[in-house]
Image (cartoon, rainbow, N blue to C red):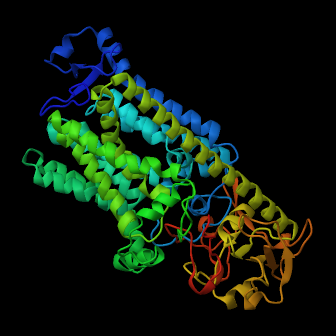
Amino acid sequence: MRGLLSGGTVVVERQVRLPKDQWGPAVTQTSARAGSPGAEQPRSRRYRAMVRDVRWPVGVAAAYTVAQLLLVVPGTGLGWDETVYVSQVSPHAPAAFFSAPRARGITFLVAPVVALTDSLQALRVYLAVLSGAGLLLSMCVWRRLLSSYVAALAGALFAGLWITMLYGSQAMPNLWVAYGALIAVGCFLIAAQDRTDRAALAGLGAAVAFTALMRPGDAFWLLLPLFGAALSVRAWRRPAVLLVLVAGAALGSAEWVIEAYLRYGGLPARLSRAGEIQGHLGWHLAFDDHVRALQGRTLCRPCNVPLREPLAAAWWFVLPLLTAGGVVAAARARKTALVLVPTVVGLALAAPYLLLVGYAAPRFLLPAYALLLLPAALGLMWLAGTALPRAVVITALVLALAAHLTVQYLILEAAVSRSRSSQTAFGRVAAELRRQGLRPPCVVSGEEAVRVAFRSGCASRQTGGHDGSITPAAMGVTARSRPVAVLVRGDAHPPSYARFWRPHPLPALPGMPGLRAYLGPATLPGPAGNQQHVASVSTGSHPVRSDGATRVPVGALRLPHSIQPFSLECSSPPVHAHGGRGRRPPTA
């Protein structure tokens, strides 16, 4: 097992396996430092050893990136949550409602590209390449603790999930939380064992801060077991480690806490509102919801669908067995801590979504999967190296992995196909609304208002539900001076303020046949309809529309107070009580 696990109390070791005996024992090569035997080796030999050590992680990260560029990136559209995050920094449309549970970390991550271009393909490519780099960085951290082969196998198993493949190029925070957690746990173990490794200490603080910036709630569940480990193991009880954990969490969550006091009436009020939007956190056993969601549903709320594809969730039941096998293998090699810590942290990150949230989305468990696949990969290699007859066992494992990847690919293909169809459908709706005179500065309300408004360059406003950003009376007043559209599905009646507006049928959206728009009196059809309502100011070389009020100098334009753009948001699309409009279809 010394070929699978490495590390010491002072000098951290890495493993370089003999290429001719992949499953056999490894040779240990101490990191070259002053005064160590490795420092006396010829530079060319050390360079070749380093290349051999990282070639598998680099190959896995490159394959993950290329697979995204070929299978996922072309033609996929922005989802509901993505639209909210991207709209916060997009100069091409006003910011959508940004509710209490959301954090702005992913918005900051996409800002450099979104500010330069409105090309969705450019954003997808940027995120695909960046997610590949994040995977590589995570594996490189862990190859100092586990062998390069184990780190690469864990990375490949994680990258092979349809969830990881789908969200690598999406503007969503969960995958980045997974990378932050992987790096934080790896740096924690390195820093705890090697008191002279300042780089690991800095990496721990940066990874915790990054995780908190993406999702402060997940950062809490990451810190909880790390604090427990640092306090319970005497050799790890270092003030510097504890201080870095606290400082990283405080730095990363500072923006979220400050915004709580500026926009939500304080931190307790924001936490309360966040819990309300997420369905009132409480004791909810959501194991079966997450199993059913693995069939390809990106959101299962409510998750009352049958499990028609049990093979899609087969790996979910195998993962705990492989994880336990990895822990046993590490215990036999007297390296229990290297595997037990990521296992406990992974379970802690999964706990709130399995026990406290009453619905499921596969992306919620990405951080847990990333950590649990480390001991699972070790368990696989241990099984392949010890079980007899070895040839039969290895063949069976290879076939099982091939079947698993095939199922993941089929689910991914279906999910990507739905995204492409959705992108086309929203394009048709936006084009039809433009023909009917809906042009900036405009307002969209009702069903799927967020995505339709963003595609049309409009503001999205609701008169009820989580996004109660405008009153019905104010909406009626607004419709007299600027284009306004209220989207209604099926046989539903329009709101009272739009009862006498001009109805117009729209192309169907996914799950919404018979979609209609009720167009306000200022929405004039025709190629030049209502152009007099568009105002812009110049800021450098780029015009800024009046509907993007957050980017217009104070005093440059005056809009009615009821439609001043602002941002707020939620961890899942608004689901309004009492039939409120703006509801996302439960099958999305």
- So how many labels did they put on this image? 0
Quadrant of the rendered image containing residue 19: top left
- Residue at 81 percent across and 81 percent down: it is 520
Residue closer to the observer: 341 or 501:
341
Relative image position of residue 385 (x, y in whole percent) = 30, 26
Quadrant of the rendered image containing residue 269: bottom left
- Residue at 30 percent across and 41 percent down: it is 375
- Residue at 39 percent across and 25 percent down: it is 392
- Residue at 16 percent across and 14 percent down: it is 37
Q: Which residue is situated farthest in the left direction here? A: 234
Residue 398, placed above or below residue 537: above
Residue 155, placed above or below residue 185: above
Relative image position of residue 339 (x, y in whole percent) = 24, 42
Quadrant of the rendered image containing residue 463: bottom right
Residue 445, placed above or below residue 145: below
Horizontal side of residue 265 vs 250, given as left or right: right
Residue closer to the observer: 225 or 480:
225
Relative image position of residue 439 (x, y in whole percent) = 79, 68
Observer able to see residue 266: yes
Give the quadrant of the C terminus. bottom right
Observer able to see residue 201: no
Relative image position of residue 514 (x, y in whole percent) = 80, 73
Horizontal side of residue 587 vs 483, given as left or right: left
Horizontal side of residue 301 vs 74, given as left or right: left
Residue 498, placed above or below residue 92: below
Give the quadrant of the N terminus. top left
